Image (tube, rainbow, N blue to C red):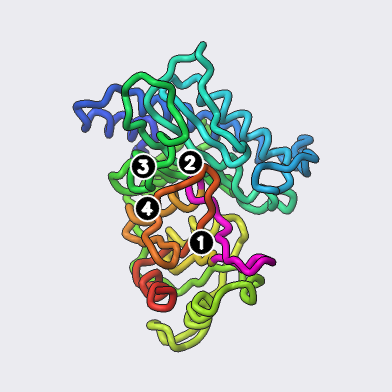
Amino acid sequence: MAQQQVTVTEHLLWHQIKSPAATGVFTQLLYDLILSAKLISRSVSKAGLLDVLGETGEVNVQGENVQKLDDYADKILIHRMERSGALCLMASEEHADLIRIDPSFTRGDYMLIFDPLDGSSNIDVNVNVGTIFSIHRRADHSGREASLEDILQEGYRQVGAGYFLYGPSCMMVYSTGQGVHGFTLDPSVGEFLLSHPDMQIPRQGNIYSANDGNYTLWDDKARLASDYFKSDRNRTGKPYTLRYVGSLVADFHRTLLYGGVFMYPAVRKPDGRFEGKLRLMCEASPLAFLAEQAGGRATDGQRRILELKPYSLHQRAPLFIGSANDVDDVMQFMS
């Protein structure tokens, strides 16, 4: 007889019961995130049949062309999450400013930061995309209106983080600081089932993931680190296999399962400055939280990602993330 699989609902309730101080508000927040992801997944799976491919003609705060599915996913998340009763603030990669909860809705102490559809430029060629989320809790309970200063917290203060991966199957991978757990959506019952309990990144990998097209734009240290993994001088004694999807969620998910290192070094700008590409608060920080909970590491090349204090909502950062040994090797070159 087949073993009964644990649903994400049962998993969340079990963890809620283990915490005597839990009120159920945080659990409700996750329920609404899950419902949002189901709606987004449904549209992604029909992207070739619905009028959701291509660009909207608008440019977002990052200077990127907005994809139709980006816009749809963003609107779904805002609509559902402001009604959760758990949030006092939201921030999206697609919006220059904070998203405040309408006074007509119940407000809570949690703050949600999200990338509604990471990798959306790959939608037109049917490559995996995903939603990344980060959850913080407001420290100030004075009753004043929540502000930008409240949400600019170090990554180690996250109370939850994760992503939904829309691919051959839809997956939810998340952590609340008690390990990393993966769930796969069963379309026949409309429920996420526990498929990857207590996920751990192998301490040593053999996969190198980076956009080598930027090699000449990296500084000397990043190029040395790249050369190390592509040579037989690394600790495995043979060149790493190169795997790069170009969708951060997909590249990180593979790294989480198989180990290795994902590198996105700072690139040289026309004025000579070096600048990171990935957003600290809605991309690097939540994935760093998952990596560390799974036994891996994440750094900007100098410091632990989770210790970086954000100074702006859309701050960017370099990212080196993955197996502990591989990230340690990167640090030998970068620092």
Asked if residue 36 can be seen in this view, the reply is yes
Earlier in the chain: of badge 1 and badge 3, it is 3
Mark 2 vs mark 4: give the one in front. 4
> In terms of secondary structure, where does tag 2 sit?
strand
Residue type (three-letter) at the residue carrying disc 4: Leu
> In terms of secondary structure, where does tag 4 sit?
helix
Would residue 272 be counted in the magenta stretch? Answer: yes
Query: CA–CA distance between discs 1 and 3?
Result: 20 Å
Q: Dot 1: within a 10 Å radius of its alpha carbon, few (fewer than 14), some, or many (20 or more) residues? A: many
Query: CA–CA distance between discs 2 and 4?
Result: 15 Å
Horizontal relation, residue 278 to residue 324: left or right? right
Q: Dot 3: within a 10 Å radius of its alpha carbon, few (fewer than 14), some, or many (20 or more) residues? A: many
Residue type (three-letter) at the residue carrying disc 2: Phe
Query: CA–CA distance between discs 1 and 4?
Result: 13 Å
Identify the residue under disc 1: 318
Are discs 4 and 3 less than 8 Å apart at CB? yes
- Horizontal and vertical percent position of residue 112: 46, 34
For the magenta stretch, what is the residue range?
A: 266-282
- Report the quarter where the N terminus lies: top left
Considering depth in this image, is 188 or 94 the residue closer to the camera?
A: 94
Query: CA–CA distance between discs 2 and 3?
Result: 10 Å
Considering depth in this image, is 172 or 83 the residue closer to the camera?
A: 83
Identify the residue under disc 2: 133
Q: Residue furthest left?
A: 20
Are discs 1 and 2 less than 8 Å apart at CB? no
Which numbered dot is residue 158?
3
Are discs 2 and 3 less than 8 Å apart at CB? no
Would residue 293 be counted in the magenta stretch? Answer: no
Earlier in the chain: of badge 2 and badge 4, it is 2
Identify the residue under disc 4: 306
Mark 1 vs mark 3: give the one in front. 1
